[in-house]
Amino acid sequence: MLRKFKVYKERKQHRDGPYGHLFEPYDGDEVVSLDCETTSLDVKEAEILSIGAVRIKGRRVKTSERLDIKLKPPKSLTGDSIVIHKIRAMDLSEGVEIEEALEQVLEFVGNRPILGYYVNFDINMLDKFLRPRYGFGLPNKAIELSHVYHDIVKWKSIGGDVDLRFDTIANKLNLPMLERHTALGDAITVALMYVRLKFGEAPKP
């Protein structure tokens, strides 16, 4: 509810500005699968290390239309976070500044819906840096992959909990996990899972 209020307020403020098109209702047939690798899972403390995104059009994951951004290594990049995402400071030596990364994201995503696994985290991370610089956060519709999966599996199941772990969903859908814990790899895997859920045979409970 809070995010909807912020989007409504920011739409009124920016609809006539240079980014007004981002606030227009989307009437196309594309979705953008997006993922961020960060130094922490705490939005307040985390820094963005890399951003990956890929467009989906109908049944097609358009891997030729993708975003693979590495940012400059932040001071908060520590050994603890490297264990998870395997991204070292040397891997980010040619990374871009956050301002350039945000420009690329806004241009690539446009006003298309944003898909992700725990997508609100990724949106909140980007909003954390967007709002101080642009005065608005991402107004896009968000599609949560785990919710799509849950609704389909629960519909076929009688009682019981649904395992929503990333690895479990991929296994249930018989899909490989591409370069796990890389932004682009996770974005493509999520895109493939989404297409399978929307257009393929529903997974068994």
Image (cartoon, rainbow, N blue to C red):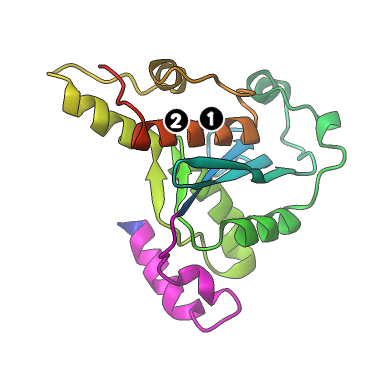
Asked if marks 2 and 1 touch (Cβ < 8 Å), the reply is yes
**Residue displayed at 57% across by 51% down:** 126
- The reply, left or right, for residue 154 in relation to residue 198 is left
Three-letter amino acid code at disc 1? Thr
**Residue displayed at 35% across by 61% down:** 4
Which residue in the structure is indicated by mark 2? 193
| Residue that sits furthest to the left in the current view | 158
> Residue 120's mark?
none
Q: What stretch is highlighted in magenta?
A: 3-29
- Give the class, few, some or many, for how many residues have Cα within 10 Å of label 2's Cα (few <14, many ≥20): many
| Residue that sits furthest to the bottom in the current view | 16
Q: Quadrant of residue 183?
A: top right
- The reply, left or right, for residue 185 in relation to residue 57 is right
- The reply, left or right, for residue 93 in relation to residue 82 is right
Three-letter amino acid code at disc 2? Met
In reply to whether residue 35 is colored magenta, the answer given is no
Residue 66 rendering spot, x and y as whole percentages: 65, 45
Q: Which of 156 and 78 is in front in this view?
A: 156
Q: In which quarter of the image is the C terminus?
A: top left
Residue 168 rendering spot, x and y as whole percentages: 41, 17
Q: Nearer the viewer, residue 8 or 65?
A: 65
* Element assignment for label 2: helix
Which residue in the structure is indicated by mark 1? 189
Q: Would residue 39 be visible to someone looking at this image?
A: no
Q: In which quarter of the image is the N terminus?
A: bottom left
* Element assignment for label 1: helix
